[in-house]
Image (spheres, rainbow, N blue to C red):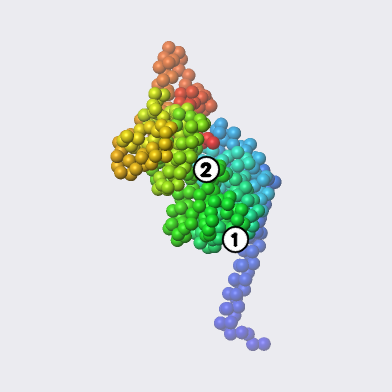
């Protein structure tokens, strides 16, 4: 039999070589899911280290990683919450696995992921990390993380579906429901703000629902804040620019109670804050003023309206020249950092016709009848906006002052500060500045 031409023999040999190589690679490659099999997926928190971290991140679609240090007190308190949440999250239709990494031991890996404090939580979604700043109690953690794997927009087809959606969404995020809107209209903004809010469109609903949310025509977009028992309605225009403006402004309630936690929500919002300082937030007369402020906030969406009680946060209010002798309520316009403005002739508000007084204050501010002032102390929002390097400088200065104070108080006794444990140092800090603990210790995070 005649042998094939050299060209055919060469092509056949090349094909055989390629086939053999492919078969060898197939034999050497682990089967799909084999990488996951090295983890015991029994609902417990996974232990990660240098050898398996990248495998976990690349093989699980959703994984929450706790970067902790064994000596960190806050980490120890967080651990049981994560242990409670882990089996629930792993059992979701779209499972979220919970893992932990000793960042103090595996410092190079922690540095690669920009870990500067403990505990730090990051959720990796198909390998892409996102910082998690939400609640850390097990039940709230589950509810919040469920949002990360939810559809960008939920489609609701009945009154009961609307009620169930709002109830399931909880109170940690604002909820947007588009009545009579096609999902394509809000898809882009829903994807953009998915981490900050719930989005849905209602295809079918009754007059009862329209009464509950106080609108009488469609299309309409409702912004709901269950935690504050309030909602607002947007009737357009629904071009993306106007739609996004409304959604950004509605991520916060009409009137925001100012606290250490809520200040964090202001750091990415550059609107000025109309801040009302009350004697006591819980007093009945304060509640009446808050209703007036809500009406003003609804008509002035280019500003953020907030309030704080002197009784609830005395140190913060003193930054605005408030003392026990100050006539309250007092209103100022704050830039969220170190500057604020008093309106001439509107230093305080009495109980007669509060609506007119608030209107006069806003008109005076917009007309430029203000006195520019500087806060008397460092602000929390200003601190969290600082680069990490400056925060560390402030921390070192603070620690140096504490050591000088200890040396002064114990100058006739043997020096013992060098043998302090971390917990003892934390006790010294806490007893020195109880109200500004979060400001002075940026490397340790706390709920």
Report whether 144 appears left or right of 369.
Answer: right
**Residue 211: percent from the left, percent from the top?**
58, 52
Label pair 1/2, CB-CB below 8 angstroms: no
**Residue 134: percent from the left, percent from the top?**
54, 43
- What is the CA distance from the residue labelled 1 to the residue labelled 2? 33 Å
* Farthest residue, direction front: 352
Q: Residue 203 carries which label?
A: 1
- Looking at the image, which residue is at 64% across and 67% down? 23
Q: Tell me: residue 348, above or below residue 325.
A: below
Q: Which secondary structure, mark 2?
A: loop
Neighbourhood count class around disc 2 (C-alpha, 10 Å): few under 14, some 14–19, many 20 upward: few
Q: Foreground residue, 71 or 139? A: 139
Instruction: Check the picture and name the quadrant holding the C terminus.
Output: top right
Q: Name the residue under label 2.
A: 133
Report whether 33 appears left or right of 183.
Answer: right
**Residue 301: percent from the left, percent from the top?**
42, 48
Give whichever of discs 1 and 2 has the lower sequence position: 2
- Looking at the image, which residue is at 48% across and 40% down? 291
- Looking at the image, which residue is at 59% across and 60% down? 203
Q: Foreground residue, 63 or 434? A: 434
User: Can the viewer see residue 151?
Assistant: no
User: Can the viewer see residue 233?
Assistant: yes
């Amino acid at each position: 039999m005649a042998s094939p031409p050299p060209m055919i023999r060469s092509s056949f040999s090349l094909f055989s070589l390629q086939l053999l190589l492919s078969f060898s690679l197939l034999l050497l490659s682990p089967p799909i899911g084999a990488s996951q099999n090295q983890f015991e997926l029994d609902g417990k928190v996974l232990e990660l280290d240098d050898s398996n971290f990248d495998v976990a991140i690349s093989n699980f679609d959703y994984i929450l990683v706790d970067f902790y240090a064994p000596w960190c007190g806050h980490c120890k308190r967080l651990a049981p919450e994560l242990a409670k949440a882990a089996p629930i999250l792993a059992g979701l239709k779209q499972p979220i696995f919970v893992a932990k990494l000793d960042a103090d031991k595996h410092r190079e890996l922690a540095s690669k992921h920009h870990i500067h404090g403990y505990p730090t939580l990051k959720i990796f979604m198909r390998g892409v990390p996102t910082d998690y700043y939400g609640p850390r109690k097990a039940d709230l953690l589950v509810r919040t993380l469920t949002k990360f794997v939810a559809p960008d927009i939920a489609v609701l087809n009945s009154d009961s579906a609307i009620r169930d959606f709002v109830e399931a969404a909880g109170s940690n995020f604002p909820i947007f429901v588009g009545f009579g809107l096609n999902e394509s209209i809000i898809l882009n903004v829903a994807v953009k703000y998915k981490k900050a809010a719930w989005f849905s469109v209602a295809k079918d609903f009754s007059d009862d629902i329209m009464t509950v949310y106080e609108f009488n025509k469609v299309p309409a977009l409702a912004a709901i804040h269950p935690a504050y028992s309030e909602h607002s309605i947007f009737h357009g225009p629904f071009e993306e620019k106007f739609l996004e403006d409304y959604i950004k402004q509605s991520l916060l309630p009409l009137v925001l109670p100012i606290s250490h936690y809520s200040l964090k929500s202001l750091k990415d919002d550059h609107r000025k804050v109309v801040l009302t300082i009350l004697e006591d937030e819980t007093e009945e007369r304060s509640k009446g003023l808050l209703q007036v402020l809500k009406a003003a906030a609804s008509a002035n969406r280019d500003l953020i309206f907030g309030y704080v009680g002197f009784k609830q946060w005395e140190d913060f209010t003193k930054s605005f020249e408030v003392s026990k002798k100050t006539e309250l309520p007092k209103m100022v316009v704050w830039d969220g950092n170190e500057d604020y403005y008093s309106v001439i002739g509107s230093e305080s508000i009495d109980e007669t016709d509060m609506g007119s007084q608030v209107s006069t204050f806003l008109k005076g501010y917009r007309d430029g009848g203000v006195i520019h002032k500087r806060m008397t102390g460092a602000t929390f929002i200003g601190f969290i906006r600082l680069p990490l390097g400056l925060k560390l400088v402030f921390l070192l200065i603070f620690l140096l002052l504490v050591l000088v104070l200890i040396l002064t108080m114990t100058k006739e006794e043997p020096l013992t500060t060098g043998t302090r444990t971390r917990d003892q140092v934390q006790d010294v800090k806490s007893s020195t500045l109880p109200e500004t603990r979060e400001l002075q210790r940026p490397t340790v995070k706390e709920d």
